Amino acid sequence: MSEEPQPPVPLRESLVPMPGGRALGYAEFGDPDGRPVLWFHGTPGARKQIPPDGPAVALEHGVRLIGVERPGTGFSTPYTYGRVLDWVDDLECFVDGLGIDRFACVGLSGGGPFVLAACHGLPDRVVAGAVLGGIGPTRGADQAPGYTRLLPLVEPVLAFTRPVLGEIVTHGIRPLRAASSRVFDLYTNIAPPSDRPVMRRPEMKAMFLEDLATAAEGGLRAPVSDLVVFGREWGFALADISVPVKFWHGDADGIVPLSHGEFQAAAVPGAEFELCPGGGHFAGFVLTRKVLGWIDGYWPEPVDDASGEVASATP
């Protein structure tokens, strides 16, 4: 009898203090002495929402893979940003708290805007940013095409009811945890057809169920807060991003329109775009080796402290 796949096991899980007594939770995988790559979860999600092969591939690439939580999920203290750009202040405190100088970012779906905010706000520290099926701006000069243009219309209602909605989701999800496997299977059957093959992989199910349990530890207030800031102007222009960015997007994505990936890739100077034919919302999420391999090309070559000369880069 074959064993059930197990979700990725972190090397370390902890908190980094933020101003005002808050904290952000995180989980580390891969090479503890490797080059830091921060992984931003989707909406919803938490610190363990990484690809099932993430730890092994990170180890191959010499990467210290760090799943970072946003406020209001898992270990992280509830808090709502006024705009996406406000994430940068917390992120800078986070990397300083872990003693990290330079790093790369990867974000799935709702994590995509926070990758771009990091690239814009911390250009001297972010090596590169990868966006996997990321939602684009929904208003302003950078408004991406698609049904998400409706989000600004409901943003005022979401913002007003956010505290109540956050509590409803938080307390509503906890009774479902005992039946989470059956609920996941039911959702998989009604998910967009392009996502079903990926979601039906046993290792993906194990990871998502573990991450859902992780997210529910501190409540599921973050998804509502994400939707509020996604319905507002982000606080920066895509054209002002100078860090290397690449977008992966499935042409059968039934959650975030393909037009978002194409629009953002055209708006960010020098950005790359990779279409995933037939791919759904998680098309880029399962391309861990490709994503980390692309990031590999942007790490600066190490300098030999003794000679001051550029040393041979780690293969």
Image (cartoon, helix red, strand yellow):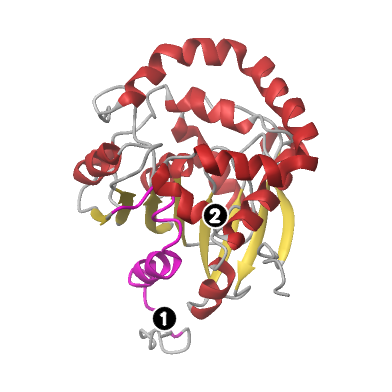
Residue type marked 1 = Val
> Which residue type does callout 2 highlight?
Arg
Tell whether 217 sits left or right of 195.
right
Residues drawn in magenta: 278-304
Q: Which residue is mark 1?
A: 303
Q: For the C terminus, give its image quadrant.
A: bottom left
Q: Earlier in the sequence, mark 2 or mark 1?
A: 2
SS assignment for the magenta stretch, majority? loop
Q: Is residue 177 left or right of residue 113?
A: right
Q: Residue 200 in the image: state x and y as whole percent.
A: 54, 54
Q: Quadrant of residue 2?
A: bottom right
Label 2, label 1: how far apart the Cα atoms are: 45 Å
Q: Quadrant of residue 125?
A: bottom left
The answer to which of 75 and 16 lies nearer the viewer is 75
Task: Give residue 129's position: percent from left, percent from top.
Answer: 38, 55
Residue visible at 61% across and 32% down in the picture: 222
Q: Which residue is mark 2?
A: 200
Report the residue at 55% width, 59% height from top.
Answer: 201
Q: In the picture provided, is 1 more to the left or to the right than 222?
A: right
Tell me if I can see residue 281 in this picture. no
